[in-house]
Image: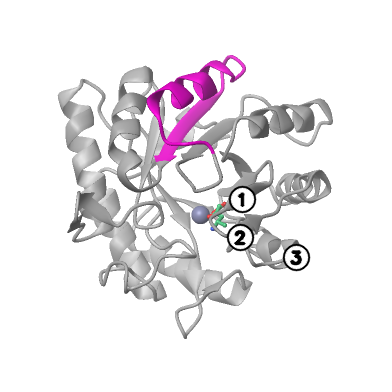
Amino acid sequence: MDKLIITVAPVGAEVTRQDNSKLPLTPSEIAEEAFQCQTEGASIVHLHVRDQAGNATQEKSCFEPAIEAIGRRCDLIIQVSTGGAASMTAAERIQPVELRPEMATLSTGTVNFGSEIFANPMPVIEKFAQAMLTYGVKPEIEVFDVGMIRNALTLVKKGLLKLPLHFDFVMGVPGGIPGEPRHLLHMVESLPPGCTWSVAGIGGSELPLAVMAIILGGHVRVGFEDNVYYSKNVLATSNAQLVQRIARMAGELGRPVASPNEARTILGLTA
Ligand code: KMH
Ligand code: ZN
């Protein structure tokens, strides 16, 4: 098995300081948290940013200072979100890809997202995939339900995505695939050979699905975007605390964590 890639999703678009007062919001807070997460074993940061009022934004001018601040503090792979928030337009969401980060997310289907709809019709997915080809950005395929794997493979046939793909199964969003072990097994079995995958379990499913991924040869995403708790009714003190637990458990299970450069090799990001 490859070493374990831990992605941290420290900010998200929906979570607030009411949910967890330790949520990083400004570029310097995000960079400091990213540094602490790399120290604990993370190798990718999945990046959302906020405006001065703390609201989610996809403005390039808000991504730039966060990307620069992270780059000054550590060498994590930066993966910008193109999901943004469910209320945003596709034109808003795609903006940070133009900054040529190493990676960006690509959601390959529409899903109910709580009381909202996270809309990704095929023409939008194709446009986003084309933008990632144009700017030389490696997509991480965000899968909120099993049909989205098939949509990604349709884009491979059209030449808009290249195998082997890297997937992230986001499981437990209200409206998406539930965060249950049998569903993770089914998703993994639905991938073409040679693809890599990680799992981002929402809320209480984060830890059990992460442990499954460690054992199955997948990779893991944790962070306040997905879960603000350390255990039932106990808030996490930082994103780094969540990363540290995964790295420790992976070590116990004989799966050491990948450094950012080792993750680059695993994901084919190096020339
Ligand atoms: N905030 C969600 C609506 C992504 O970052 O690519 C979408 C999301 C996925 O978070
Ligand atoms: Zn996200």
**Magenta span:** 177-200
Q: Nearer the viewer, mark 1 or mark 3?
A: 1
State the image coordinates of residue 97 (x, y, percent, origin top left).
65, 57
Do the residues under discs 2 and 1 have CB atoms within 8 angstroms? Answer: yes
Q: For numbered disc 1, what is the local secondary structure?
A: strand
Ligand 1 resides in the quarter of the picture at bottom right
Residue 115 appears at what percent x and percent y? Answer: 57, 60
Query: Furthest residue to the bottom?
Result: 53
The residue where tag 2 is placed is: 116
Residue 209 at x, y percent in the picture = 35, 32
Q: Position of residue 47 (x, y in %)?
A: 48, 58
Within 10 angstroms of label 2, few (less than 14), some, or many (20 or more) residues? few
**First reached walking from the N terminus: tag 2 or tag 3:** 3
Q: Is mark 2 within 8 Å of ligand 1?
A: yes
List the residue tagged with mark 3. 91
Pointers 1 and 3 in contact (CB under 8 A)? no
